[in-house]
Amino acid sequence: MKKVNTIILLLILSITISFCKKSNSSAPNTPVTPITPVAPTPEKDFTNSTAVEYYGPLKVSGNRITGKADAAVQLRGMSFFWSQWIGKYYNASVVKWLKDDWYCNVVRAAMAVEEGGYLTNPDVEKQKVFDVVDAAIANGMYVIIDWHDHHASDHQALATKFFAEIAQKYGDKPNIIYEPYNEPLQVSWKTIIKPYHQAVIDTIRKYDPDNLIICGTSTWSQDVDVAAYDTLVGTNIAYTLHFYAGTHKQSLRDKAKVALDKGIALMVTEYGTTDATGDGFVNQTETNLWYDFLDANKLSWCNWSIADKAESSAALFSGSSASGNWMNVQLTTSGSFVRQEMRNKNLRFK
Ligand code: MG
């Protein structure tokens, strides 16, 4: 009898433990990693075509960037870091990983000009751009070729030579997007930046009549409202808007709205989730407000940056492989957050 009682007691105890375990596993405060892989869903899966096949050649229609059948196109992807400092990620296997795992449909090659960049090593830096562009074409992605310079108007002859070469080499490919002037400083749009852009545009158009050219604006590509009142001459011209969510908030969105309402098209070729220094707190709340604005206005974007530098805007922790295949634990807070945004909203292409 004593033995039977013990068995019953053990049975009750075991049922209680099993119930407690179940309750714990479904507790609402169970930590959830924000970068748990998202299983592809059929409605997101367009693996029978590439992004470029799906959206087609891009053009500017009023204040929108459009593709096939004049439908507005919003691209989301990643910018590489200054090519002369962190050039190790400028390769085909990283580009393919960004498409397959991050769902990027655009990448940006940020070719450094000063500080050991193109001015010093033109062939070396140019080759990094070619490697990324060739990989983007092979993967059916869009690619922004960025003259990453704060003083491009001082290097106009070299810039026009560079873009003439790019236009002759790649101008027949719908993948290519030109960005002739990353971030002009606080200099005159009318007398310095605009004449520079016009010279580069006129040169590109000798060889390539149609691919998008996205033009930087004064104050680190924030004064898009100024450009909207004094526009460049040419077809398929849009303007660069840059922001860093920890620093630039509603007042910059208001400037962008003025520019859009005036009728120019914008592309966010670079933004960060952090302060404008590229470092500091990763401001997910403000970045989400920006995402709402970008989505509402169909503005394409590239996040800064694919780098393993010890600063919070870098997407990767130090030492992350130069060939992609990154594990979730190698992604920083910013990298995880931005990757998840793309996996949630971009289509998954071949
Ligand atoms: Mg073309």
Image (cartoon, rainbow, N blue to C red):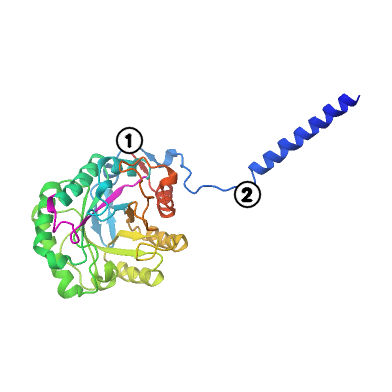
Q: Nearer the viewer, residue 339 or 73?
A: 339
Residue 301 in picture, x, y percent from top left: 33, 56
**Label 2 amino acid?**
Pro
Q: Nearer the viewer, residue 252 or 110?
A: 110
Q: State whether residue 44 is above or below residue 195.
A: above
Check the picture and name the quadrant holding the C terminus: top left
Residue 195 in picture, x, y percent from top left: 13, 69
**Label 1 amino acid?**
Asn
Residue 344 in picture, x, y percent from top left: 43, 48
Q: Is residue 115 one of those drawn in magenta?
A: yes
Do labels 1 and 2 touch, CB within 8 Å? Answer: no
Tell me which residue sits at (39%, 39%) in the image.
45
* Range shown magenta: 103-123
Check the picture and name the quadrant holding the N terminus: top right
User: Which residue does the numbered mark 2 point to in the structure image?
Assistant: 28
* Residue 205 in sight here: no
Residue 201 in picture, x, y percent from top left: 13, 61
Mark 2 nearby-residue class (10 Å; few <14, some 14–19, many ≥20): few
Whichever of labels 1 and 2 marks the residue nearer the N terminus, that label is: 2
Secondary structure at numbered mark 1: loop
Q: Quadrant of residue 152?
A: bottom left
Tell me which residue sits at (38%, 65%) in the image.
275
**Outermost residue toward the right in this view:** 1
Q: Tell me the CA gap for discs 1 and 2.
A: 39 Å
* Residue 16 in sight here: yes
User: Which residue does the numbered mark 1 point to in the structure image?
Assistant: 48
